[in-house]
Amino acid sequence: QVQLVESGGGLVQPGGSLRLSCAASGRIFGLYNMGWYRQAPGKQRELVADITTGGTTNYADSVKGRFTISRDNAKKAAYLQMNSLKPQDTAVYYCCVKTLGLVPRDYWGQGTQVTVSS
């Protein structure tokens, strides 16, 4: 059973920074992408950024130039460095592992709250 645990959320002032971490436990077979999604109140969950095993990254337009995703394959971990935070970045942030192959599967963490407010 794959489990994901996020950490690093909290309250930060506009313009501040936070670093989210995601640690996966359990066996993950084959190649997999890791990503961060977020969901604000009353809105749908949206992709923030994701990264392939080889390190290719993809970002939502709203966070380009401010957020950086990275991963450590040996630790089965992913990170999201968030700089120049804005109030509209306030949301619950979820880590996701998407396995590739014949039977793709998605695994989700429980989420961590990020609040950007003065």
Image (cartoon, helix red, strand yellow):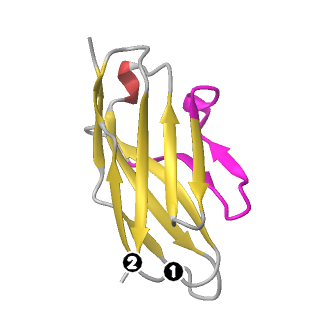
Q: Residue type at mark 2?
A: Val
Q: Residue furthest top?
A: 118
Q: Answer whether residue 53 is magenta in the image.
A: yes
The local secondary structure at tag 2 comes to loop
On the rendered structure, is 10 left or right of 24?
Answer: left
Q: Residue type at mark 1?
A: Ile
User: Mark 1 and mark 2: span between their CA atoms?
Assistant: 7 Å
Q: What percent of the width, then of the height, locates residue 70?
A: 60, 48
Q: What percent of the width, then of the height, locates residue 6?
A: 34, 53
C-beta proximity under 8 Å, tags 1 and 2: yes
Q: Earlier in the sequence, mark 1 or mark 2?
A: 2
Q: Which dot marks residue 28?
A: 1
Q: Nearer the viewer, residue 86 or 69?
A: 69
Q: What percent of the width, then of the height, locates residue 101?
A: 65, 83
Magenta span: 45-67
On the rendered structure, is 99 left or right of 45?
Answer: right
Q: Which dot marks residue 2?
A: 2
Q: Residue at x 49, y 66 (%)?
A: 97
Q: Residue at x 40, y 29 (%)?
A: 89
Q: Nearer the viewer, residue 76 or 29?
A: 76
